[in-house]
Amino acid sequence: MDLGIVGRSAILVASSRGLGRACAESLAREGVNLVLNGRTAADVEQAVVELREAYGVDVRGVVGDATTTEIQDALLAACPQPDIVLLNGEGPTPALFDSITQEQWAETAQRSMIAPILFVQRVVPGMCERKFGRIVAISSAMVKSPNVLMSLSHGPRLGLTGVLKGLSRDVVKYNVTVNQLLPERFDTGRQQQMAEIAVAIKGITFEEARAEQVATISAGRLGRPEEFGDAFAFLCSAQAGYISGQNLQLDGGSYEGVF
């Protein structure tokens, strides 16, 4: 299928590796020009070169923490009028619920909710004026019980979901859509990190920790990053203009509800 986005421009936050890199790959294949972002210069430079050489699109890199005003300025300097924006970010190190401090909650809220909202405020007016925009956030489909290992970002990301849902109703008439992708367990470095933490806390082997991850998924396997990237690309397509304000579960059929 021709997604109708050849020549469009995208800013992809936290896209030098993992699920963000998979999203970049899928857009580049469709002929979209990219601004990639990551905190590690070597990762960003490698992704820029590989995608540029593989797909012949314009690919630029911005190294740094995209939750800061400085790096958000740099992203918009590299692409002043983005048609597509991916909101993504590495989650904080998981911790036990009763060990999380007020300062940690506040920092996570700033990074996972407030900073992305401020960036969206800057790009939405131009999208509405040009009558095309696709904003997609990667959030979390999984909420752990408070008495076990959990991610601090669940609460702030749910707050971001609420804000983006409200925004989606106001901007869709301008052909600007706002959606979220909710990944379960995909085979990226993040799941390797989670397995290593489980090894340290539970005293199990790495293989046992990985088996525990797979056991929670109805499909009986971890998701492949390219599956995630292609779902993202479709939400960015010309054909997806009637999909907005949605949270798409990518969970290997694990969600038990009907809606």
Image: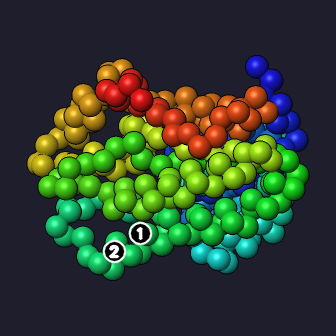
* Above or below, 99 relative to 163: below
Using the rendered view, name the quadrant where residue 256 is placed: top left
Residue 221 in view in this figure: no
Judge by depth and name the residue closer to the eye, 164 or 68. Answer: 164
- Within 10 Å of disc 1 (Cα), the crowding (few <14, some 14-19, many 20+) is many
Residue 208 in view in this figure: yes
> Residue 91: which numbered mark, if any?
none
Q: Position of residue 199 (x, y in %)?
A: 19, 48
Are the residues tagged 2 and 1 within 8 Å (C-beta)?
A: yes
* Above or below, 198 relative to 64: above
The image shows a total of numbered marks equal to 2
- Identified at 33% across, 62% down, the residue is 152
- Identified at 66% across, 72% down, the residue is 71
Q: Amino acid at mark 2?
A: Gln
Quadrant of the rendering where the N terminus is positioned: top right
Q: Position of residue 123 (x, y in %)?
A: 75, 61
Q: Which residue is mark 2?
A: 104
Q: Left or right? Give the position of 253 relative to 68.
A: left
> Residue 108: which numbered mark, if any?
1
**Under tag 1, what secondary structure?**
helix
Quadrant of the rendering where the C terminus is positioned: top left
Q: Left or right? Give the position of 117 relative to 195.
A: right
Judge by depth and name the residue closer to the eye, 162 or 104. Answer: 162
- Within 10 Å of disc 2 (Cα), the crowding (few <14, some 14-19, many 20+) is few
